Image (tube, grey):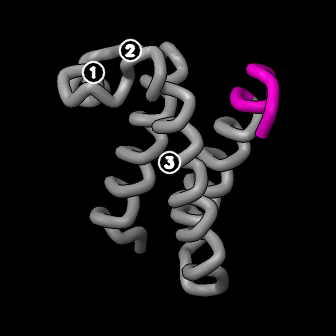
Amino acid sequence: MSNAEFVGLVNMLHATAEAALGDLNAATASAARDGLLLEGRARQTAERSLKLLTMLSEKTRGNLDFTEAELLSHAIGSLRERLNALGGH
């Protein structure tokens, strides 16, 4: 059974990065309020979230259930794709 806190952490990091890349919604409004989405910091915020998600993946390899592993893999893949589309990374 998936750990709710782990799922929440992955979703939060993914949402923060998505918000930094321009996908604003009610769930990511706090990142905007905290200044994480300012023009000079947006890409840095997304890259930091990607690094944290990648570290989580490495440190938890073999210890996640299928749902957790898929969620984490999807978050990393979609962020890498978006950052690559923006150039660099």
Residue located 50% across and 14% down the image: 22
Mark 2–mark 1 Cα distance, whole angstroms, equals 8 Å
Q: Amino acid at mark 1?
A: Ala
Q: Is residue 45 left or right of residue 57?
A: left
Secondary structure beneath dot 3 equals helix
The residue mark sitting in front, 3 or 2, is 3
Residue 7 x %, y %:
39, 58
Residue 28 x %, y %:
31, 26
Residue that label 3 marks: 49
Secondary structure beneath dot 2 equals loop
Say which mark, if any, is on residue 32: 1
Q: What is the quadrant of the N terminus in the image?
A: bottom left
In this picture, which residue range is highlighted in magenta? 82-89
Say which mark, if any, is on residue 24: 2
Q: What is the quadrant of the C terminus in the image?
A: top right
Find out whether the residues at labels 2 and 1 contact each other: C-beta distance under 8 Å: yes
State whether the magenta stretch is mostly helix, strand or loop.
helix
